[in-house]
Image (cartoon, rainbow, N blue to C red):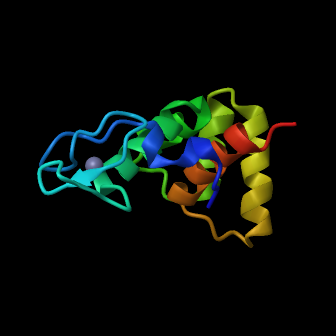
Amino acid sequence: MSTTPTSSPRTVPCPPSPAGCGAPAGASCTSHGGTRERHNFHRARTAALEAARIAAVPAAKLVADTGAWVRHGKHAADLLDKNGFTVEAEQLRRAVSEANGHMSAKQAIAFLVDQAQGGEG
Ligand SMILES: [Zn+2]
């Protein structure tokens, strides 16, 4: 997993209680009604970050939104091709091939996000 600053749950607000603590972006998560600072983040906040990262990458968002029939990285690549994301489709096909065909749709989404946010330059 990436450890760049942009991948920290701290960069997004924590969802309100009961899923999270409602901490604003940049602030630590708290527990016990805000009296104690947590050393980790609420699951809901981590999920919110993941959703935000996916939303920022059109190709990844397409795969995530389509859901249902996309169960495999290969399907995701086909979907991308059909929707004009030919570069992303090609990158994904190569990654699936390198993984000997073992790539879930979920992993494909993570791959697309990493490519878009960390693979430039
Ligand atoms: Zn929180």
Name the one closer to the observer, 19 or 100.
19
Percent coordinates x, y for residue 5 in the rendering? 61, 45
Q: Is residue 6 left or right of residue 88?
A: left
Quadrant holding the C terminus: top right
Q: Position of residue 40 (x, y in %)?
A: 38, 61
In the foreground, 28 or 61:
28
Looking at the image, which is closer to me, 75 or 27? 27
Residue located 23% across and 39% down the image? 22
For residue 77, side relative to residue 10 (left or right): right
Where does the image place residue 9, in percent across and percent down from the top left? 44, 47
Could one spot residue 68 in this view of the protein? no
On the question of residue 13 being in view, the answer is yes
Q: Quick check: 4 left or right of 44?
A: right
Residue at horizontal 34 percent and vertical 36 percent from the top: 13
Identified at 78% across, 64% down, the residue is 97
Q: Residue 29, percent across and down?
A: 31, 50
Q: Residue at x 25, y 51 (%)?
A: 30
